[in-house]
Amino acid sequence: MRTVVPIALAALIAGSPAKAAEPETFMIDTATDLARLCAIAPDHPNYMPAIHFCHGYLIGMHHFQAALAAELAEPFYCAETAQPQPTRNTAAADFSAWVAANPKAAEMEALDALITWAIAAYPCS
């Protein structure tokens, strides 16, 4: 396993954006890794697996946050109160745009960046 991660990371760094969307490279470490999958063009041959992976990651983080909020009695972010309600596609596009606009966020761990973005995008106050 230790050799697979560096090889996959090298493929992501060296490859073109199209290569970054190959199913065998769906290794998510940084915000950039996740943003690439979330921003994939609908006409890309790997659009379906990439966008479904992205949506699964977003929903997984949302469920994680909901479970923690139930324990802590306080959510990190409040997407449920946002108007209009964000869709998976909107959240994916907004997160990808945020990563592109925030170079410091690009190399954050994907989950940390996603939570940081969600707190800024959907504040509870």
Image: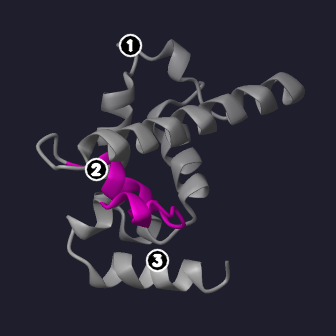
Identity of the residue drawn at 26% across and 78% down? 15
Task: Tell us which disc is closer to us: 1 or 3.
Answer: 3
Task: Tell us which disc is closer to us: 2 or 1.
Answer: 2
Label 2: which secondary element: helix
Identity of the residue drawn at 32% across and 58% down? 36
Q: Along the horizontal axis of the image, is 3 left or right of 82? A: right
Residue 85 position within the rendered picture, expressed as x and y whole percent measured from the top left? 40, 15
Label 1: which secondary element: loop
Residue 31 position within the rendered picture, expressed as x and y whole percent measured from the top left? 46, 61
The answer to whether 70 is drawn above or below residue 23 in the figure is: above
Q: Which mark is residue 8?
A: 3
Task: Identify residue for label 1.
Answer: 83
User: Dot 2: within a 10 Å radius of its alpha carbon, few (fewer than 14), some, or many (20 or more) residues?
Assistant: some
Q: Earlier in the sequence, mark 1 or mark 3?
A: 3
**Range drawn in magenta:** 22-40
Viewer-closest of 70 and 58: 58
Q: Earlier in the sequence, mark 2 or mark 1?
A: 1
Task: Identify residue for label 2.
Answer: 97
